[in-house]
Each structure stands twice: as structure tokens, then as C-alpha cells.
């Protein structure tokens, strides 16, 4: 009986150590603090972001003023606030990706795929390019545990994102800055 208890205890310890070494963290919460949006009036007639009262979800409205016939790209940089009282952020990672190619791939395991699938589930956005002139929405977008990289620590963050058309001299369509607090378990 003592041998069984020791084996069981050893199994629990090994599972705990493996979980710790794997860097397993789960999202406790993500709260949006503020968003700042902008858009290029040549291509977009309206672009807005609104945070819910409980700060856990965000809604977007996008009205394209014309067809976007070239591939659209996303450049996103996530930075973590350096000090509690300051406004200085240290870049954690940057993505620059062709969204048309990612949308065309369907399912995947990359962080961009998780983000895009999370948004597309709650949206009337087209699932492929080109993007047609029209009104689009993305509603009740919230973070899920798969959408936060494991190496992210709890803290305050800023994400600067630009959606642009590389083939059109890098013209920006929209720019968004998200300020948020992330708590990891």
C-alpha cells in the first residue's frame, strides 16, 4: 500500500513539474482599457471600435468606400508596459502577415490563425479576398486562452495594428491601438 501511495505521489509531482516546465499558463482575464482608431478616407468611410461596459469584449464597424482588389496585410506589434506609472512600452513581438493568404488557408495553429478565426466567428467579414465595398461588423470579440501566447506575463499591454495594402504603395486602410490588461494564472 505504501508503494502505491509513493507511486501516486511521484506521478502527481511529475505531472506538476512537466506542466511547469512546459510553461502552461491559462488566461485568467483580458480587459480592454482603451482603443484609438484611424482610417484612410480614400478607402474607408467609417471605422470604429467600442469596448463593452464590462471591458471584456470589443465591437468594430468598418465601412469600405471601395473594393480592395489587392492583398491586404496586417502589421501588429504587441508591447508590454515597462513601469506601472509610465507610458513606455517594450515590444514583445511583431507580426507582418498577408491576411488574404491566411484567410485562404482555413484552419491552422499559428497565433494569427487563432486571432483571425476568433474575429471571423463573430463577423460578416468576407472569408477571402478581394474585399468588396460595403459595411462590415465584428461583434463581441473577446480573447480566448489560445489567443494569448504562453510567454506573455500578466501586465498592461498595447497592440498597434495597421491594416494596409502593400501593392498600393503601402497605403493604410485602418490603424488601431488597443490598450489592455492581461492576467495569466
Image: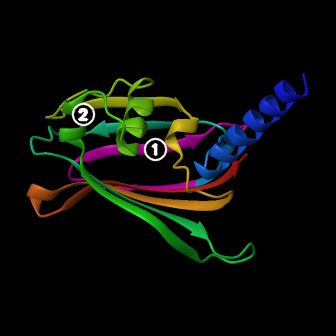
Tell me if I can see residue 79 in this picture: yes
Identify the residue under disc 1: 48
Residue at 36% across, 38% down: 62
Query: Relative to residue 70, is residue 164 depicted above or below?
Result: below
Instruction: Name the quadrant containing residue 89.
Output: bottom right
Nearer the observer, disc 2 or disc 1? 2
Q: Position of residue 31 (x, y in %)?
A: 67, 46
Q: Which residues are magenta?
A: 35-54
Q: Which residue is mark 2?
A: 103
Mark 2 element type: helix
Say left or right for 23 vs 60: right
Residue 185, labelled with which disc? none
Residue drawn at x 56%, y 41% is: 50
Give 69 or 146, whichever is nearer the viewer.
146
Quarter of the image where one finds residue 75 = bottom left
Q: Position of residue 106 (x, y in %)?
A: 26, 27
Is 29 located above or below residue 38 in the figure?
above
In this view of the protein, which residue sits in the foreground, 105 or 118? 105
Figure quadrant of residue 61: top left
Which residue is at the front of the view, 59 or 156?
156
Who's the residue at 17% across and 62% down the image? 170
Amino acid at each position: 500500500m505504501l508503494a502505491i501511495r509513493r507511486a501516486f505521489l511521484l506521478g502527481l509531482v511529475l505531472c506538476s513539474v512537466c506542466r511547469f516546465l512546459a510553461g502552461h499558463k491559462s488566461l485568467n482575464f483580458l480587459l480592454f482599457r482603451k482603443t484609438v482608431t484611424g482610417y484612410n478616407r480614400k478607402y474607408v468611410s467609417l471605422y470604429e471600435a467600442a469596448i463593452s461596459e464590462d471591458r471584456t469584449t470589443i465591437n468594430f464597424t468598418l465601412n469600405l468606400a471601395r473594393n480592395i482588389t489587392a492583398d491586404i496585410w496586417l502589421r501588429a506589434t504587441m508591447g508590454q508596459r515597462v513601469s506601472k506609472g509610465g507610458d513606455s512600452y517594450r515590444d514583445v513581438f511583431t507580426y507582418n502577415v498577408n491576411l488574404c493568404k491566411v484567410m485562404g488557408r482555413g484552419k491552422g495553429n499559428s497565433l494569427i490563425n487563432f486571432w483571425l478565426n476568433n474575429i471571423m466567428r463573430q463577423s460578416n467579414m468576407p472569408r477571402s479576398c478581394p474585399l468588396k465595398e460595403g459595411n462590415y461588423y465584428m461583434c463581441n470579440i473577446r480573447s480566448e486562452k489560445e489567443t494569448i501566447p504562453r510567454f506573455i506575463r500578466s501586465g498592461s499591454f498595447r497592440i498597434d495594428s495597421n491594416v494596409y495594402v502593400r501593392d498600393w504603395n503601402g497605403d493604410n486602410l485602418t490603424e488601431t491601438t488597443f490598450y489592455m490588461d492581461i492576467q495569466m494564472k
